[in-house]
Amino acid sequence: MVHQRAFLAAAGGKHPGSKVETTGNIAIGLRRLLIAAAVLVGALCGTGLFGPSAHAQQSGPFAALAGRWAGGGVVTLEDGSTERIRCRATYAVGGPRMGLTLVCASSSYKFDLHGDVAAEPGGVITGTWTESSRNVTGNLQGRGRGGSFQVVASGPGFNANISLVTRGNRQSITLRAGSQFQGATISLSRF
């Protein structure tokens, strides 16, 4: 009954089977229906049911990274051997700040990296990271903007140079370290 009343209100008070319905009333009803639909979609977007607006996703220095990514690459282990790895990354972007998760695994190696980074004026990047499978934490420092970042991750007994380049829906990550692994080269795609 509620839907019928809403339809009658949108259709200018006339039932669709009514013979007194005019073209003017149909146009008015259609216009009211479109306005109501626009208000409903706007309200849903405003409450976050459809996620952040496109404008919000496109602002800030980390905007090109926002979202979920997956792919693979190669890890070079301490003894010089290499293994294929599969990876998933998630970047939660909010203006000049970003939370990140990068999980990669091969047949004998796994890392689970979490970080919180901020962009400062002049393209300076600072933050913290945690590698949960080894219970290691540290700091991130570097530079970048526009989807291209060069940072150093440092912590107790660990230093790694990280290069991250994003172009559209493709991302490449290169890690160079001198500890349990020598480095990794990873290619990801947004999904």
Image: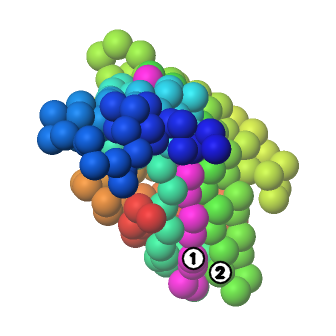
For image coordinates 30% across by 16% down, the residue present is 122
Where residue 103 appears, as percent x and y from the top left, is 65, 62
Marks 2,1: beta carbons within 8 A: yes
Amino acid type shown at disc 1: Arg
Seen from the viewer's position, the closer of residues 72 and 135 is: 72
Measured along the vertical axis of the image, is residue 61 above or below residue 188? above
Could you tell whether 103 is left or right of 143 in the image? right
Is label 2 in a helix, a strand or a loop?
loop
Q: Which residues are magenta?
A: 82-95
Q: Quadrant of residue 36?
A: top left
- In the figure, is residue 68 to the left or right of 168? right
Is 85 colored magenta in this rendering? yes
Q: Position of residue 176 (x, y in %)?
A: 49, 58
> The N terminus appears in which quarter of the rendering?
top right
Q: Which residue is mark 1?
A: 86
Circle 1 residues within 10 Å: few <14, some 14–19, many ≥20: some
Q: CA distance from mark 2 to mark 1?
A: 7 Å
Q: Label 2: which residue?
A: 106
**Which secondary structure class fits the magenta region best?**
strand
* Residue located 36% across and 54% down the image: 17
Answer few, some or many: residues within 10 Å of disc 2's Cα (few below 14, many 20 plus, some between 14 and 19): some
Q: Secondary structure at mark 1?
A: strand
Residue situated in front as seen by the camera: 72 or 70? 70
